[in-house]
Image: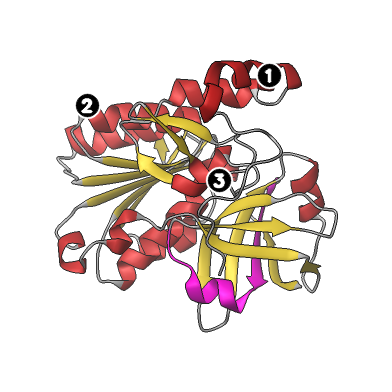
Amino acid sequence: MYKILKKKALGSQVILMDIEAPRVAKASLPGQFVIVITDEKGERIPLTICDYDKKRGTVTIVFQTVGDSTRRMAEYDEGDSFFAFTGPLGHPSDFVKEPLEEVKKKKFIFIGGGVGVAPVYPQVKWLKEQGIDVDVIIGARNKDLVILEEEMRAAAKNLYVCTDDGSYGFHGLVTDCLRDLVEKQGKSYDHAVIIGPMIMMKFAAKLTKELNIPTVVSLNTIMVDGTGMCGACRVMVGGEVKFTCVDGPEFDGHLVDYDGAMRRMSIFKTEEGQKALREAEGKTHRPKHGCGVQGAKIG
């Protein structure tokens, strides 16, 4: 059992929890995710790791209550325990595996939208711990929906907060803010990391391509079972079939077929849609219930 040591509401539907999970914390790296199961009959909930403390043996998760499973998860309080907390899963961020001296030569810009700010944070924090300063843009529809501002401000060299309605910080989308930084303030970047809603990543990556900034995106939002069994996270990247939970969750942001991924997400929810996908995708289709686990790393 995995005890909840801390619970904090970051917004009306966004919850942060610190979970006691020493083995997971010890093995965690930025970019990876965990699978949470609330009880013996609970569904698998994949969540990107927001933070981890190897000394305390804790892992921080942030989630939005969007369905029955996450609503039930939000009912758990400090002192309660989850039935399972499996991880770390997925591949760590690329820069974690690169020679540190090469990483230090790069100028990073991180962009987080909505709840996507949570998985951006451990990457920014890890780089700060290596002595690397980075710029960060975080965006939300309005001031009340901005999350982890204080934590991000402590980890980033420069933090730019923007809201769609102008109620706080820069008035505009994250793409407007990035264009302003590059074209009006003379900023330059060698690498971008973008995490947030699929539509936001699509247009932010379109802009970074225009600005010639190599880009990575995380497709964590389309994962369902987190092991490659359900096929919900099937996506085309550079014309090749990939499964987010076993091949990612991070990919080259300029090669992802965002329109195909969004279209697939909408039709995968129905039985009729799944049948159509089986016929269209042939051998590359993953059934909703039944293929083997591929490459899952359990810590």
- Tell me the residue at 55%/22% (across/down): 282
Provide the secondary structure element on which disc 3 rests. helix
Mark 2 nearby-residue class (10 Å; few <14, some 14–19, many ≥20): few
Q: Position of residue 33 (x, y in %)?
A: 54, 56
Quadrant location of residue 48?
bottom right
Instruction: Give the farthest residue toward the right.
Output: 41
Distance between the Cα atoms at labels 3 and 1? 31 Å
The label on residue 115 is 3
Residue underneath mark 1:
275
Provide the secondary structure element on which disc 2 rests. helix
- The part of the chain drawn in magenta is 13-30
Indicate left or right for 70 with 257 as reference: right
Q: Where is residue 115 in the image (x, y as percent from the top left)?
A: 55, 45
Residue underneath mark 2:
210
Mark 1 nearby-residue class (10 Å; few <14, some 14–19, many ≥20): few
Nearest the eye: 84 or 56: 84
Q: Where is residue 262 in the image (x, y as percent from the top left)?
A: 53, 24
Which of pointers 3 and 1 indicates the residue nearer the eye?
A: 1
Which of pointers 1 and 2 indicates the residue nearer the eye?
A: 1
- Tell me the residue at 74%/73% (across/down): 3
